[in-house]
Amino acid sequence: MTTETLFSIPKKAGQAMVRIEFEGETLHVPDGISVAAALLSSSRGALRTSIVKGTPRAPYCMMGVCFECLVEIDGIPARQGCMTLVRDGMIIRRQSGAPSLEGLASGGKNGE
Amino acid sequence: MANNVNDLVVIGSGPAGMAAAVEARALGMTVSVLDEQPAIGGQIYRRVEDAPEALQMILGKDYGAGRVLAEEFRQSGAAHIPGATVWNLTEDGVIDYVDAGGTRTISATNVLIATGAMERPFPIPGWTLPGVMGAGAAQIMLKSAGAQPAGSVVLAGCGPLLYLLAWQYLRAGVKLAGLVDTTRFSTYVTALGKVHGAVTGRKDLVKGLGLISRVRLARVPIYSGASDLEILGEDHAEGIRFRHKSKSREISAGLVLLHQGVVPNTQLSWSLRAEHRWDAAQLCWTPVTDDAGRLGETQIHVAGDSRRIVGALASAIQGRLSVLAMHERKGGTAQPGHKAELQRQLARYTALRPFLDVLYRPLDEHRIPADHVTVCRCEEVTAGEVRSYVDLGCLGPNQTKSFGRCGMGPCQGRLCGLTVTEIIAAARKVAPGEVGYYRIRPPIKPIHLGSFAQSTS
């Protein structure tokens, strides 16, 4: 694993922050940025593993075309991290391989 | 869900989409603009409305130009529908999209596809590793979040955006471990022959060269004429290896930003089964349209980079000209001289393009990679596997799907389609135009079934 995050966001006075949870770790990130930008700036390593060979992956395009940033957000698998803005209290998890049907079922319960 | 019939629905709120909306409103048309992003501007003018001043300083003057257009757009009275992912479009102007509230439908007499460009895939060994991203992606990190590389970073490839990002990083105080430039000096000489519009395009040219020399002055190691790029690392990027002046070189970096130009985002025009042709100058597929961007006899126009790569300023003009064509077809007339003036501007903004296409032509080995390189990132299919399909009789990209699921993942071929076209063409020794492309069908973006369950129609 890398020893540092790939990106950093310089702190700004008066910047509104939100609290998100990634793999059980609480992260304080600026409001208004995408989940992918938040994770690239405050966590290390892969966001998911690929569906065929289980290789580590992380966001590549940041504009919604490559689907490398797929993560589970609030129980719903396969969300595009680069297309989803952070929200206070959001719970994000890594995704290994293809999303399971169990995950889809619990996503349904949330009504989203 | 009520069907709102608009005179014009624009898909994409980048320069082409915003300018088209402004033009259409001025002609009295009712206009809705859908965009997948929460804010207007597209990728080039991303966050243009509320970028902090310090960030604007870093991004430079050209970015600031987007503010004027964004303001015009806001004042035009066009409806902006943010967070709208279009997944279906029909020839007669029905558009299905998903937003936070579920699935919705909107109809229009005219539709403008203004979905812009995406970075050209850069299939080289190791390009799927965490720590490898597009330079454009890193620029989006900068524009949208003010995020900068935290550790050692290398920029590699070619094209204006690569140098622009290097320059923006320098202004932001980011240190670059290197700029690995695949452009060759001999290409400059060839490319200069293309500058027929030298006088009109010269300003852009000087600006581009100025960026490179400023990066050079900042003592960033620049490796010009590099080739055979390869990412180092097992679980994440640890650096880049390349050939430079017939020597193999390596630079350590945890973040490698790749770029070799942008290509039209053609998913929507393909999904309409519109005719596309292989553009040998830009090495990509482009929809066949008339001068105003109209697809055949349909109600659909395409403007800006999603028609062919022309850049932000020309895209805006094309958006306006498409709207004038829609207006004329209905029997309307434009203000005298207005159309001619737009056409003059378009000629000026596109004068340098043939030069850029030659100068920044990506290297063959970075488009048509060796056998062991992954080309389909989603289904993890290598170039060698695609070639083995050809040996078995596979004639084009669409058939690679049944041979080995190539192109069938969530990105729907966006990140492998051009590569697969060129690999097959080279293997069959035919022109790329002969092998065709994937058949793109709606939904053109994967959508959650929950979005349908949520909607009541």
Image (cartoon, coloured by chain):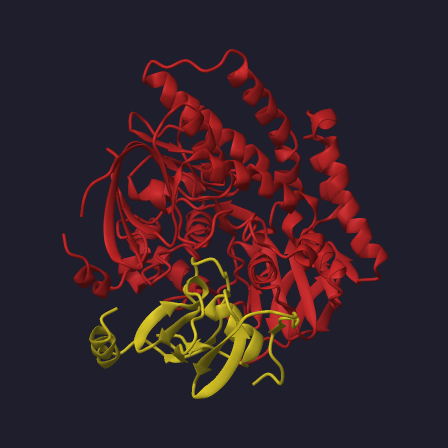
Chain colours: A yellow, B red
Q: Position of residue A58 (x, y in %)?
A: 49, 72
Which residue is farthest front? A14
Which residue is farthest top? B336
Whether residue B164 sits left or right of residue B126 in the image: it is: right
Whether residue B203 sits left or right of residue A13 in the image: it is: right
Q: Position of residue A79 (x, y in %)?
A: 36, 68
Q: How many marks?
A: 0
The front one of B274 and A86 is A86
Residue drawn at (73%, 62%), measured in percent from left and top? B172
The front one of B248 and B271 is B271
Whether residue B448 sits left or right of residue B58 in the image: it is: left
Which residue is farthest bottom? A24
Residue drawn at (21%, 64%), measured in percent from left and top? B449
The front one of B298 and A26 is A26
Q: Position of residue B92 (x, y in %)?
A: 23, 33
Q: Position of residue A5 (x, y in %)?
A: 60, 78
Residue B245 in view (yes/no):
no
Residue B55 falls in image quadrant: bottom right
The front one of A90 and A45 is A90
Whether residue B417 sits left or right of residue B452 in the image: it is: right
Residue drawn at (73%, 55%), measured in percent from left and top? B167
Q: Is residue B240 above or below residue B213?
A: below
Residue B333 in view (yes/no):
yes
